Amino acid sequence: MAANFIDYVKIYCRSGKGGAGCMHLHRAKYVPKGGPDGGDGGRGGHIILEGNRNLWTLLHLKYQKHIMATDGGRGGESRSFGKDGEDKIIQVPCGTVVYDGDTGEWICEVKEHGERVTLLKGGRGGLGNWHFRTATNQAPRYAQPGEPCQERNVILQLKVLADVGLVGFPNAGKSTLLSVVSAAKPEIADYPFTTLTPQLGIVSYRDGQSFCMADIPGIIEGASEGKGLGLRFLRHIERNAVLLFMVPATSEDKVKEYQILLGELEKYNPELLTKARILAISKCDIETEETVDTAALEKELGIKVLRISSVSGLGIQELKDALWEELQKEQNQVIEISHAPMQIEAHETSSDEGEEEDEEQGTIYLNEVEEEWDLEKYRGIGWDQ
Protein backbone atom coordinates (compact mmCIF):
# COMPACT_ATOMS: atom_id res chain seq x y z
CA MET A 1 0.00 0.00 0.00
CA ALA A 2 2.86 2.39 0.71
CA ALA A 3 4.12 2.02 -2.85
CA ASN A 4 0.63 2.71 -4.22
CA PHE A 5 0.06 5.92 -2.26
CA ILE A 6 0.79 8.60 -4.84
CA ASP A 7 -0.03 12.15 -3.75
CA TYR A 8 2.15 14.08 -6.24
CA VAL A 9 2.21 13.82 -10.02
CA LYS A 10 3.34 16.12 -12.82
CA ILE A 11 1.57 15.80 -16.17
CA TYR A 12 1.45 17.56 -19.51
CA CYS A 13 -2.00 18.69 -20.67
CA ARG A 14 -3.10 20.03 -24.05
CA SER A 15 -6.56 21.06 -25.16
CA GLY A 16 -7.85 20.63 -28.69
CA LYS A 17 -7.39 23.10 -31.56
CA GLY A 18 -10.41 24.74 -33.08
CA GLY A 19 -11.39 23.49 -36.53
CA ALA A 20 -10.85 25.79 -39.50
CA GLY A 21 -13.82 27.40 -41.22
CA CYS A 22 -14.62 26.30 -44.75
CA MET A 23 -14.15 28.50 -47.83
CA HIS A 24 -16.66 27.23 -50.36
CA LEU A 25 -18.86 28.70 -53.08
CA HIS A 26 -22.17 26.96 -53.76
CA ARG A 27 -22.46 25.29 -57.14
CA ALA A 28 -25.67 23.77 -58.52
CA LYS A 29 -27.14 23.17 -61.97
CA TYR A 30 -29.83 25.82 -61.77
CA VAL A 31 -28.09 28.14 -59.31
CA PRO A 32 -25.41 29.90 -61.32
CA LYS A 33 -24.40 32.26 -58.50
CA GLY A 34 -25.07 30.37 -55.29
CA GLY A 35 -22.69 32.47 -53.22
CA PRO A 36 -20.61 31.43 -50.22
CA ASP A 37 -21.79 28.53 -48.09
CA GLY A 38 -18.72 27.52 -46.09
CA GLY A 39 -19.52 26.16 -42.63
CA ASP A 40 -17.87 26.86 -39.27
CA GLY A 41 -15.19 24.74 -37.68
CA GLY A 42 -15.82 22.74 -34.52
CA ARG A 43 -14.63 23.63 -31.03
CA GLY A 44 -11.55 21.93 -29.65
CA GLY A 45 -11.90 19.64 -26.65
CA HIS A 46 -11.47 20.94 -23.09
CA ILE A 47 -9.29 19.50 -20.32
CA ILE A 48 -11.58 19.13 -17.29
CA LEU A 49 -10.85 18.03 -13.72
CA GLU A 50 -13.62 16.20 -11.88
CA GLY A 51 -13.69 15.26 -8.20
CA ASN A 52 -14.31 11.60 -7.39
CA ARG A 53 -14.79 10.48 -3.79
CA ASN A 54 -14.08 6.87 -4.76
CA LEU A 55 -10.44 7.70 -5.55
CA TRP A 56 -7.92 7.73 -2.73
CA THR A 57 -4.64 8.54 -4.50
CA LEU A 58 -3.29 9.84 -7.81
CA LEU A 59 -1.98 6.40 -8.74
CA HIS A 60 -4.06 6.27 -11.95
CA LEU A 61 -2.18 9.32 -13.25
CA LYS A 62 1.31 8.15 -12.37
CA TYR A 63 1.90 6.47 -15.74
CA GLN A 64 -0.35 8.78 -17.78
CA LYS A 65 2.00 11.70 -18.24
CA HIS A 66 0.43 13.17 -21.40
CA ILE A 67 -3.28 14.02 -21.52
CA MET A 68 -4.54 15.60 -24.73
CA ALA A 69 -8.04 16.42 -25.95
CA THR A 70 -9.02 16.00 -29.60
CA ASP A 71 -9.13 18.82 -32.15
CA GLY A 72 -12.28 20.28 -33.65
CA GLY A 73 -13.30 19.24 -37.15
CA ARG A 74 -13.14 21.46 -40.20
CA GLY A 75 -16.27 23.11 -41.56
CA GLY A 76 -17.80 21.80 -44.77
CA GLU A 77 -19.81 23.01 -47.69
CA SER A 78 -23.53 23.74 -47.52
CA ARG A 79 -22.86 25.44 -44.16
CA SER A 80 -21.97 22.14 -42.52
CA PHE A 81 -20.44 22.65 -39.09
CA GLY A 82 -17.32 20.77 -38.08
CA LYS A 83 -17.46 18.24 -35.25
CA ASP A 84 -16.55 19.48 -31.77
CA GLY A 85 -13.49 17.93 -30.20
CA GLU A 86 -14.00 15.39 -27.42
CA ASP A 87 -13.41 16.74 -23.92
CA LYS A 88 -10.87 14.95 -21.75
CA ILE A 89 -12.11 14.49 -18.17
CA ILE A 90 -9.47 13.76 -15.54
CA GLN A 91 -10.83 12.04 -12.44
CA VAL A 92 -9.05 13.19 -9.27
CA PRO A 93 -9.69 12.50 -5.56
CA CYS A 94 -11.38 15.19 -3.50
CA GLY A 95 -8.79 17.55 -2.03
CA THR A 96 -6.57 17.76 -5.12
CA VAL A 97 -4.70 21.04 -5.62
CA VAL A 98 -3.33 22.05 -9.03
CA TYR A 99 -0.18 24.12 -9.60
CA ASP A 100 1.53 25.35 -12.74
CA GLY A 101 4.38 22.95 -13.46
CA ASP A 102 6.73 25.67 -14.75
CA THR A 103 6.13 28.62 -12.43
CA GLY A 104 4.68 26.88 -9.35
CA GLU A 105 1.66 29.24 -9.33
CA TRP A 106 -1.54 27.93 -7.75
CA ILE A 107 -4.26 27.31 -10.36
CA CYS A 108 -7.28 25.66 -8.74
CA GLU A 109 -8.45 22.97 -6.33
CA VAL A 110 -11.13 20.29 -6.39
CA LYS A 111 -12.76 19.64 -3.01
CA GLU A 112 -16.21 18.13 -3.63
CA HIS A 113 -17.48 14.99 -5.34
CA GLY A 114 -18.69 15.76 -8.85
CA GLU A 115 -17.14 19.24 -8.88
CA ARG A 116 -15.77 20.12 -12.31
CA VAL A 117 -13.05 22.63 -13.10
CA THR A 118 -12.04 23.49 -16.66
CA LEU A 119 -8.26 23.39 -16.60
CA LEU A 120 -7.64 24.23 -20.28
CA LYS A 121 -10.22 25.49 -22.78
CA GLY A 122 -10.30 24.18 -26.31
CA GLY A 123 -9.83 26.59 -29.20
CA ARG A 124 -12.89 28.14 -30.84
CA GLY A 125 -13.75 27.00 -34.32
CA GLY A 126 -13.19 29.39 -37.22
CA LEU A 127 -16.07 30.98 -39.11
CA GLY A 128 -16.80 29.91 -42.66
CA ASN A 129 -16.83 32.37 -45.55
CA TRP A 130 -20.64 32.49 -45.37
CA HIS A 131 -20.30 34.90 -42.41
CA PHE A 132 -18.22 37.40 -44.37
CA ARG A 133 -20.56 38.02 -47.31
CA THR A 134 -21.52 41.68 -47.78
CA ALA A 135 -23.13 43.75 -50.46
CA THR A 136 -19.74 44.78 -51.75
CA ASN A 137 -18.03 41.44 -51.16
CA GLN A 138 -20.54 38.85 -52.28
CA ALA A 139 -18.02 36.05 -52.83
CA PRO A 140 -15.42 36.15 -50.04
CA ARG A 141 -12.68 33.68 -50.72
CA TYR A 142 -11.37 33.40 -47.20
CA ALA A 143 -12.43 31.86 -43.89
CA GLN A 144 -11.17 31.96 -40.35
CA PRO A 145 -8.68 29.48 -38.98
CA GLY A 146 -9.48 27.80 -35.68
CA GLU A 147 -8.02 29.11 -32.46
CA PRO A 148 -4.84 27.34 -31.35
CA CYS A 149 -4.80 24.88 -28.47
CA GLN A 150 -3.65 25.60 -24.93
CA GLU A 151 -0.93 23.54 -23.29
CA ARG A 152 0.86 23.57 -19.98
CA ASN A 153 2.61 21.37 -17.46
CA VAL A 154 0.62 20.98 -14.27
CA ILE A 155 1.42 19.53 -10.86
CA LEU A 156 -1.35 17.71 -8.99
CA GLN A 157 -1.02 17.49 -5.22
CA LEU A 158 -3.38 15.57 -2.97
CA LYS A 159 -4.26 17.12 0.38
CA VAL A 160 -6.57 14.67 2.11
CA LEU A 161 -9.79 15.93 3.69
CA ALA A 162 -10.00 15.15 7.41
CA ASP A 163 -11.30 16.79 10.59
CA VAL A 164 -8.46 15.92 12.98
CA GLY A 165 -4.77 15.60 12.15
CA LEU A 166 -2.25 13.72 14.30
CA VAL A 167 1.13 15.38 14.76
CA GLY A 168 4.01 13.86 16.66
CA PHE A 169 7.47 12.37 16.64
CA PRO A 170 8.02 8.81 15.40
CA ASN A 171 6.81 6.14 17.85
CA ALA A 172 4.62 8.62 19.72
CA GLY A 173 1.64 6.26 19.46
CA LYS A 174 -0.26 7.95 16.63
CA SER A 175 -0.93 4.78 14.63
CA THR A 176 -1.91 2.86 17.75
CA LEU A 177 -4.42 5.55 18.69
CA LEU A 178 -5.90 5.53 15.19
CA SER A 179 -6.27 1.74 15.27
CA VAL A 180 -8.08 1.94 18.62
CA VAL A 181 -10.56 4.75 17.91
CA SER A 182 -11.34 3.70 14.30
CA ALA A 183 -11.44 0.64 12.08
CA ALA A 184 -8.21 1.63 10.31
CA LYS A 185 -5.37 -0.89 10.46
CA PRO A 186 -2.10 1.01 10.09
CA GLU A 187 1.20 -0.79 10.47
CA ILE A 188 2.42 -0.72 14.07
CA ALA A 189 5.93 -1.68 15.18
CA ASP A 190 8.54 -0.73 17.78
CA TYR A 191 10.85 1.10 15.37
CA PRO A 192 10.60 4.68 14.07
CA PHE A 193 8.98 5.67 10.77
CA THR A 194 6.69 2.67 10.71
CA THR A 195 4.06 4.86 9.02
CA LEU A 196 5.35 5.84 5.59
CA THR A 197 2.08 7.13 4.11
CA PRO A 198 -0.87 9.03 5.57
CA GLN A 199 -3.69 6.93 7.02
CA LEU A 200 -7.35 7.91 7.43
CA GLY A 201 -9.83 6.56 9.95
CA ILE A 202 -13.47 7.31 10.79
CA VAL A 203 -13.89 7.78 14.55
CA SER A 204 -17.31 6.77 15.90
CA TYR A 205 -18.90 9.12 18.42
CA ARG A 206 -22.14 9.24 20.38
CA ASP A 207 -25.57 8.98 18.73
CA GLY A 208 -24.17 7.62 15.48
CA GLN A 209 -22.03 10.69 14.83
CA SER A 210 -18.47 10.45 13.58
CA PHE A 211 -15.47 12.46 12.39
CA CYS A 212 -12.41 11.74 10.27
CA MET A 213 -8.88 11.48 11.69
CA ALA A 214 -5.67 11.58 9.65
CA ASP A 215 -2.36 10.07 10.74
CA ILE A 216 0.74 11.33 8.93
CA PRO A 217 4.30 9.98 9.17
CA GLY A 218 6.23 11.28 12.14
CA ILE A 219 8.30 14.43 11.85
CA ILE A 220 11.56 15.16 13.65
CA GLU A 221 13.59 18.23 14.44
CA GLY A 222 15.11 19.53 11.21
CA ALA A 223 12.37 18.07 9.02
CA SER A 224 12.11 21.42 7.20
CA GLU A 225 15.71 20.84 6.08
CA GLY A 226 14.90 17.39 4.72
CA LYS A 227 15.74 15.23 7.73
CA GLY A 228 13.71 12.09 8.26
CA LEU A 229 10.82 12.07 5.79
CA GLY A 230 10.88 15.86 5.56
CA LEU A 231 7.71 17.92 5.48
CA ARG A 232 6.15 16.52 2.31
CA PHE A 233 3.29 14.87 4.21
CA LEU A 234 2.33 17.97 6.18
CA ARG A 235 0.18 19.04 3.25
CA HIS A 236 -2.33 16.44 4.41
CA ILE A 237 -3.14 18.30 7.63
CA GLU A 238 -3.50 21.76 6.08
CA ARG A 239 -7.25 21.24 5.72
CA ASN A 240 -7.78 19.80 9.21
CA ALA A 241 -9.89 21.76 11.69
CA VAL A 242 -8.08 20.46 14.80
CA LEU A 243 -4.47 19.39 15.27
CA LEU A 244 -3.87 16.69 17.90
CA PHE A 245 -0.26 16.77 19.11
CA MET A 246 0.99 13.58 20.71
CA VAL A 247 3.96 13.42 23.09
CA PRO A 248 4.73 10.15 24.94
CA ALA A 249 4.73 10.14 28.74
CA THR A 250 8.24 8.68 28.67
CA SER A 251 9.61 11.91 27.16
CA GLU A 252 12.04 13.79 29.39
CA ASP A 253 10.98 17.28 28.25
CA LYS A 254 7.41 17.30 26.95
CA VAL A 255 7.25 21.07 26.51
CA LYS A 256 10.38 21.08 24.37
CA GLU A 257 9.07 18.31 22.12
CA TYR A 258 5.79 20.16 21.64
CA GLN A 259 7.61 23.39 20.77
CA ILE A 260 9.83 21.55 18.27
CA LEU A 261 6.78 20.13 16.53
CA LEU A 262 5.14 23.54 16.53
CA GLY A 263 8.27 25.12 15.06
CA GLU A 264 8.43 22.63 12.19
CA LEU A 265 4.78 23.33 11.36
CA GLU A 266 5.46 27.06 11.35
CA LYS A 267 8.36 26.63 8.92
CA TYR A 268 6.12 24.68 6.57
CA ASN A 269 3.04 26.92 6.72
CA PRO A 270 2.53 29.62 9.38
CA GLU A 271 -1.27 29.35 8.91
CA LEU A 272 -1.17 25.96 10.64
CA LEU A 273 -0.58 27.77 13.95
CA THR A 274 -4.02 29.38 13.72
CA LYS A 275 -5.79 26.01 13.98
CA ALA A 276 -7.19 24.61 17.20
CA ARG A 277 -4.65 22.45 19.05
CA ILE A 278 -4.91 19.74 21.70
CA LEU A 279 -1.98 17.98 23.37
CA ALA A 280 -2.33 14.30 24.26
CA ILE A 281 0.23 12.68 26.56
CA SER A 282 0.29 9.10 25.23
CA LYS A 283 1.52 5.86 26.81
CA CYS A 284 0.38 6.94 30.29
CA ASP A 285 -0.07 3.29 31.27
CA ILE A 286 3.73 3.07 31.56
CA GLU A 287 4.18 5.96 34.01
CA THR A 288 2.46 6.68 37.32
CA GLU A 289 -0.37 9.20 37.50
CA GLU A 290 1.76 11.76 39.34
CA THR A 291 4.34 11.84 36.54
CA VAL A 292 2.32 14.08 34.20
CA ASP A 293 0.89 17.29 35.64
CA THR A 294 -1.69 18.23 33.01
CA ALA A 295 -2.77 21.38 34.84
CA ALA A 296 0.77 22.77 34.83
CA LEU A 297 1.18 21.93 31.15
CA GLU A 298 -2.11 23.60 30.25
CA LYS A 299 -1.09 26.75 32.09
CA GLU A 300 2.34 26.84 30.42
CA LEU A 301 1.25 25.99 26.86
CA GLY A 302 -2.18 27.58 26.82
CA ILE A 303 -3.92 24.57 25.25
CA LYS A 304 -5.92 21.62 26.53
CA VAL A 305 -3.77 18.68 27.72
CA LEU A 306 -5.09 15.13 28.19
CA ARG A 307 -3.56 11.90 29.47
CA ILE A 308 -4.35 8.87 27.31
CA SER A 309 -3.34 5.27 26.85
CA SER A 310 -4.33 3.43 23.69
CA VAL A 311 -3.53 0.06 25.30
CA SER A 312 -5.56 0.41 28.50
CA GLY A 313 -8.15 2.84 27.10
CA LEU A 314 -7.28 5.54 29.64
CA GLY A 315 -8.70 8.93 28.58
CA ILE A 316 -9.83 7.79 25.11
CA GLN A 317 -13.46 8.85 25.61
CA GLU A 318 -12.38 12.16 27.15
CA LEU A 319 -10.18 12.73 24.12
CA LYS A 320 -13.10 12.09 21.76
CA ASP A 321 -15.24 14.54 23.74
CA ALA A 322 -12.55 17.24 23.57
CA LEU A 323 -12.05 16.75 19.82
CA TRP A 324 -15.79 16.80 19.14
CA GLU A 325 -16.19 19.97 21.21
CA GLU A 326 -13.51 21.73 19.16
CA LEU A 327 -15.00 20.52 15.87
CA GLN A 328 -18.39 22.00 16.78
CA LYS A 329 -17.02 25.49 17.38
CA GLU A 330 -18.04 27.99 14.74
CA GLN A 331 -14.51 29.24 14.07
CA ASN A 332 -13.45 25.69 13.15
CA GLN A 333 -16.32 25.00 10.75
CA VAL A 334 -14.89 26.68 7.65
CA ILE A 335 -11.61 25.15 6.53
CA GLU A 336 -10.12 27.54 3.99
CA ILE A 337 -6.40 27.59 3.33
CA SER A 338 -4.31 29.78 1.08
CA HIS A 339 -2.07 27.72 -1.15
CA ALA A 340 1.37 29.26 -1.38
CA PRO A 341 3.09 29.00 -4.79
CA MET A 342 5.44 26.06 -5.18
CA GLN A 343 9.14 26.58 -5.63
CA ILE A 344 10.11 25.08 -8.99
CA GLU A 345 13.81 24.42 -9.38
CA ALA A 346 15.08 25.80 -12.69
CA HIS A 347 16.88 23.29 -14.89
CA GLU A 348 20.19 24.76 -15.99
CA THR A 349 21.34 23.59 -19.42
CA SER A 350 24.85 23.78 -20.76
CA SER A 351 25.75 25.84 -23.82
CA ASP A 352 25.95 22.71 -25.98
CA GLU A 353 22.43 21.70 -25.00
CA GLY A 354 21.17 25.20 -25.75
CA GLU A 355 22.67 25.07 -29.25
CA GLU A 356 20.97 21.73 -29.90
CA GLU A 357 17.63 23.17 -28.80
CA ASP A 358 18.05 26.17 -31.12
CA GLU A 359 18.73 23.83 -34.02
CA GLU A 360 15.64 21.80 -33.21
CA GLN A 361 13.48 24.93 -33.01
CA GLY A 362 14.72 26.04 -36.38
CA THR A 363 13.69 22.79 -38.04
CA ILE A 364 10.43 23.06 -39.99
CA TYR A 365 8.56 20.01 -41.15
CA LEU A 366 6.28 19.87 -44.17
CA ASN A 367 3.11 18.96 -42.28
CA GLU A 368 3.61 21.92 -39.95
CA VAL A 369 3.93 24.32 -42.88
CA GLU A 370 0.67 23.08 -44.35
CA GLU A 371 -1.20 23.70 -41.08
CA GLU A 372 0.42 27.09 -40.44
CA TRP A 373 -1.96 30.04 -40.61
CA ASP A 374 -1.16 33.72 -40.89
CA LEU A 375 -3.51 35.18 -38.29
CA GLU A 376 -2.67 38.80 -38.94
CA LYS A 377 -4.59 39.02 -42.22
CA TYR A 378 -7.77 38.01 -40.40
CA ARG A 379 -7.65 40.78 -37.82
CA GLY A 380 -10.61 43.15 -37.90
CA ILE A 381 -13.15 40.76 -39.38
CA GLY A 382 -14.58 39.52 -36.11
CA TRP A 383 -12.25 36.65 -35.18
CA ASP A 384 -10.19 38.70 -32.71
CA GLN A 385 -13.32 39.97 -30.95
Image (tube, grey):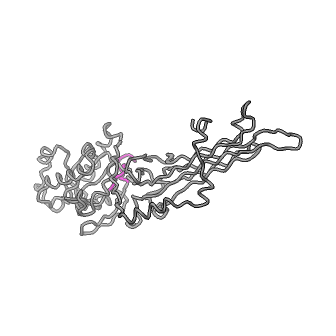
Tell which of 24 and 200 is nearer to you. Answer: 24
Q: In which quarter of the image is the N terminus?
A: bottom left
Q: Which residue is depicted at the point 30% across and 54% down?
A: 234
Q: Is residue 94 visible?
A: yes
Q: Which residue is depicted at the point 20% across and 60% down?
A: 283
Asked whether 179 falls inside the magenta stretch, the response is no
Q: Is residue 44 visible?
A: no
On screen, residue 47 versus residue 1, left or right, reads right
Highlighted magenta segment, given as a residue range: 202-214
> What is the magenta segment's predominant secondary structure?
strand
Query: Which residue is farthest right?
Result: 30
Count of numbered labels shown in the rendering? 0
Image x and y of residue 15, in percent: 54, 51
Query: Which residue is farthest top?
Result: 135
On screen, residue 110 versus residue 249, left or right, reads right
In which image quadrant can residue 312 be found?
A: bottom left
Image x and y of residue 28, in percent: 85, 44
Image x and y of residue 41, in percent: 66, 46
Q: Quadrant of the C terminus?
A: top right
On screen, residue 369 versus residue 150, left or right, reads right
Tell which of 241 and 106 is nearer to you. Answer: 106
Q: In this view, does 31 lie above or below 225?
A: above
Tell which of 197 and 370 is nearer to you. Answer: 370
Asked whether 207 falls inside the magenta stretch, the response is yes
Image x and y of residue 169, in percent: 22, 59
